[in-house]
Amino acid sequence: MSEVQQNAGGAPDPTYDRNTVLIFDTTLRDGEQSPGATLNLAEKLEIGRQLARLGVDIIEAGFPVASPGDFEAVTRLAQEVGQMEHPPVITGLARANKTDIDRAWAAVQWSKKPRIHTFIATSDIHLQHKLRITRNDCLEQVGEMVSYAHGLCQDVEFSPEDAGRSDPEFLWQVLAIAIQSGATTLNIPDTVGYCTPSEYAAMIEGINKNVPGIGNVILSAHCHNDLGLATANTLAGIEAGVRQVEVTINGIGERAGNTSLEEVVMALHTRRQRFGNLRTNIDTTQLVRTSRMVSAMTSITVQPNKAIVGANAFAHEAGIHQDGMLKNPLTYEIMRPEMVGWNETNLVLGKHSGRHAFSERLKTIGYELTREELDKAFERFKILCDKKKIVTEADLEALVADQFESINEVYKLNALNVTSGTGNVPVASVRLVDEEGEAHEDAALGNGPVDAVCNCINRITGVDAKLTEFHVHAVTEGIDAIADVTIRIEMTSDSGKRMVFSGRSADTDTLVASGKAYLSALNKGLRRRQTVK
Ligand code: KIV
Ligand code: ZN
């Protein structure tokens, strides 16, 4: 850390031009709040680097006070991604209290452009039932805490949580105090995804008209997707004057998720004139890659019909459409697939490819591995080449994501055998190795082969985890395709709290991939149990 210079705080760029919509990516904070989407440090760093490559302006790297792991991740992102040549702003979330703000500052201060993002709820329902404070208490706390944050860092963002259900006049008062106390960005969250587009736009217009000093700060939109309106609300916010949007890759986030980055960016790009020629700093050709990386690392699959990044987003099935496309793509296509990065070549590498070509190819798909990580990945790549003639980008992605997933393992899968077929009950035998290197073996029956594998792993680890979701998809076509398995499990914490974890793994053998994915989810649960009592 010695060579990293502590920074007194990066003020927002005075040359900021109002024709640019700033992209604030919260995949690593609000996105990681998706049930089961836990990311380890290496995964967060890899995603952070890719977000920088994508061109996001601000990365919300986490909620530093939430756990030592979150603090470390925000610190490392600030020290690495935040120290790049043209770095994004690195911010960390903090409730409006000194402990949270100090912790956020301690983590983000290492970046060239740090920001503290502090928030407090402003709706009566939250004030009365959650915070149990009066409106006056809230106003006082905003003044004190935004000033306190501003004393540490020049760039301070303030969010009135549940703004969408707050009394507008009270909201204006809160925002005015935040501006007087030094906030430079005011973010307006529709925390519960309740607003409609015209309501959200009206809220922004009301703020623009009624909050003194509003012209000196940047207004930001933060919309949740509970009614499927997050993108529509965010675009309505832009039309009403917001110039920062808080978004996540693939729209992941609390409950039904956040606004999806790729949808907003491509709406602005494709309908440029409709949006008054506003621009973003995003390199749209990186969208599909980023989406895939986030999906692989969070184990949250992207629905095939998802706009922009879903597998079917550019697939034309109907004969009439195909005919039109052949005559002129403009008949049915409003964007070219290559604009968003759907131009991957299939023939990538094979068993004669060397380490250099392998590492270069990984870099082009967004993965920068350490020497040690690369050694391990290359070894696994060679094993894969013995099973598969052609290794595509999608295979490489599955291979590397699998490797990141296996960091921090409590148990490793050492051997797995399954017998199944007609006329007998499926039985699995499994050997796991724990952190001390001790082997544990057992066998179990199941309703099917995957069930037998999961039961067996439960018996060995003594964890009563329940498999709630199981998805398998072939990474590429053909008989030798890699099976990519995504699993979700439910476990209970020691205090009886329900916890959800997901795991993902890829292998040419579907049952091995299933066993590894199940174990990966279970390992995350066991690690969490060690930290949350
Ligand atoms: O949804 C929300 O209100 C938030 C705030 C903390 C910004 O995520
Ligand atoms: Zn949110």
Image: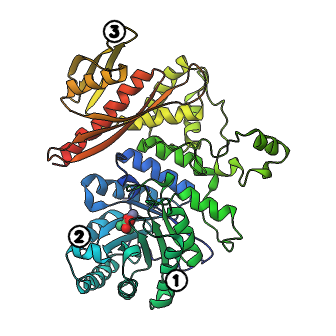
Q: Which residue is mark 3?
A: 424
Please rate how many residues cluster around mark 3, counting C-alpha atoms within 10 Å: few if below 14, some from 14 to 19, many from 20. few
**Would you identify the image quadrant in which residue 441 lies?**
top left
Image quarter in which the N terminus is found:
bottom left
Residue 316 shown left or right of residue 471 in the figure: right
**Would you identify the image quadrant in which residue 275 lies?**
bottom right
Vertical placement of 100 versus 218: above or below?
Answer: above
Query: What residue lies at 34% left-to-right and 58% top-to-bottom?
Result: 75
- Labels 3 and 2 touching (C-beta < 8 A): no
Between the C-alphas of marks 3 and 1, the distance is: 68 Å
Whichever of callouts 2 and 1 sits on the residue coming sooner in the sequence is 2
Q: Is residue 54 visible?
A: yes
Whichever of callouts 3 and 2 sits on the residue coming sooner in the sequence is 2
Of the residues shown, which amino acid type is indicated by label 2? Lys
Count of numbered marks? 3
Q: Which residue is mark 2?
A: 130
Q: Which residue is mark 1?
A: 205
Query: What residue lies at 42% left-to-right and 70% top-to-bottom?
Result: 189
Q: Position of residue 182 (x, y in %)?
A: 38, 84
Q: Is residue 110 visible?
A: no
Vertical placement of 454 versus 522: above or below?
Answer: above
- Labels 2 and 1 touching (C-beta < 8 A): no
Element type where label 2 sits in the image? helix
